[in-house]
Amino acid sequence: MRPGGFQLLRIGGIDVTIDYSWFVIFFLVLYTMAESYFPRVHSDYSTGQYWIMGSVAALLLFVSILLHELAHSFVALRQGIRVEGIRLFIFGGLAEVATDAPNGRQEFLISLAGPATSMGLGAFFLAVHFIAGGVAAAAAGIAWWLGWANILLALLNLIPGFPLDGGRILRAFLWDHWDDMARATRVVSRIGNAFALFLIILGILQFLLTRSLLSGLWLVFIGMFMKQSAVGSYQSLMLKRALEGVEVRQIMSAEVVKVDWLTPLDRLIQDYIYRRQVTRFPVFNREEFVGMVSLGEVKKVSRALWGFKQVRDVMIPVDEVPCLGPTDPAGEALSRMAAAEDGYMPVVEDGVLLGIVTRRDILNLFKIKSDLGAA
C-alpha cells in the first residue's frame, strides 16, 4: 500500500500507483459513456452492451494515460534522471521524477514525449475505427472515441502553462534562450496561473448560463488544481535554489530529548509528550540508539495498559526508522520527508544519533534566505 493509493504494477522498474481519487473519474467516464455517449451515437444496442462498451472505453482511456506518463518516464530514464514512479489520480496521471532535468534540451525531450505518444495513440485508434467500421461497429465506435480523446489529451497538454507539458516545453525553450531556469519557470507559472483562472471563470459561467453543475464544477476543480500546481512549481524551484549547498548537519538540532526504552507509557505521556509539547522522541537503551516512539504508537495501546507497557513494547526499531546522514543535502532531506509523510527525522552516522531535523527547520532556513534575498 502507498499513502493515498495502492501499487498496481511495476513496468521497466517504474512503480505504477493508483490513487483512490482515480476511481472517481474512472466511474464518471464509465457512466458518461454507458448512459449518454454510446446510446446517443449507437441506438441499436442494449443497456448491458452500452455498459460493456463504456467499460472498455474507460479502461483503454486510462491505459492511454498510463502510456503517456510512461513515455515521459522512459525518456527521463534515458537522460539519466531517476523516476520514482507514476501515479494515476483524479486529474489523470503524473510521472514522479526524482530530480529536474539538468538543461533545457533534456526538459524539452522529456516533456514532448507524452503529447507525442498521445497523438500517436490517437492516430492508431482512428485507424482502427476506419479498418473495423464495416466489420465490428461497436469496436469502431469505441476506437473513434478513444482516437479523439487521445488527440484532445495531447492538445490540452500542449497549452503553454504549468503544470502541463506545454508549459514545460515552453520553459525548456526559455531556459535554453535565457540560460535562467528560475526566470523561465516564473514566466510559465504565471501563464499556467492565468489559464487556471480562465478555467475557473469558465466553469462558473457554464454553471450560471447552462445550469450544467457537473461540467461547471469539473472545470473549476481542474482550474484550482492547475493554479495550485503553477504556483507550487515556482515555489518548489525557489526552495531548491535556497537549499543548494546546505547539508543536514548545518540545520539539525543537536540537543535531543531522549527516552529510555524501559519508560512506562504513562510516564512518557506525562513527563515527555505533555511537558515538552512534542509527539516523537528517539529511544535509547543506555547509550545505544534503538528506535523512535511517537504518540501514534501509544494511541494504539489501551489506556488501561499504559502503566504496564513500556516504550520498548511500542517503539519503531531503528532499522525501520527513516534516517538522514549529516552530509545529506537539505533539499534531499525535505523530499524524503515528503515521500515518507514524516516531518521529523533522526540524523545518524555509524549508528550514533547526532541530532534531529524537522521540516520546520528546513522551511525556516528557506524563509530566512528568502527574506534576506528580498532585503
Image: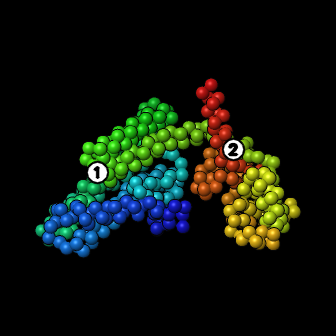
Q: Position of residue 259 (x, y in %)?
A: 82, 59
Q: Is residue 368 left or right of residue 105?
A: right
Number of numbered labels in the structure image: 2
Question: Residue 148 versus residue 117: which sits nearer the camera?
Answer: 148
Q: For the residue carrying disc 1, how many other residues have a C-alpha within 10 Å: few (<14), some (14-19), or many (20+)?
A: some
User: Within the image, what quadrant is residue 139 found in?
Assistant: bottom left
Front-lying residue, 362 or 49:
49
Instruction: Give the percent coordinates (x, y) of residue 44.
Output: 14, 70
Nearer to us of marks 1 and 2 is 1
- Percent of width and height locating residue 169: 39, 42
Residue shown at the point (79%, 47%) measured from the top left? 254
Residue type at mark 2: give it: Asp
**Residue 63 visible in image:** no
Q: Relative to 166, say whether 14 is above or below.
A: below
Q: Taking 10 as reference, is 275 above or below it?
A: above
What residue is shown at x 74% (from left), y 69% (from top)? 303
Q: CA distance from mark 1 to mark 2?
A: 47 Å
Instruction: Kindly identify the residue that appears in the image at 55 percent across and 61 percent down.
Output: 3
Along the viewing direction, whichever of 247 and 198 lies nearer the viewer: 198
Q: Amino acid at mark 1?
A: Ser
Q: What residue is at 73 percent from the left and 42 percent from the top?
A: 250
Q: Outermost residue, left direction?
A: 134
The x, y position of residue 269, in whole percent, is: 78, 60
Location of mark 1 (residue): 212
> Which comes sooner in the sequence, label 1 or label 2?
1
Q: Looking at the image, can residue 255 be seen? A: yes
Quadrant in which the C terminus appears:
top right
Residue designated by label 2: 361
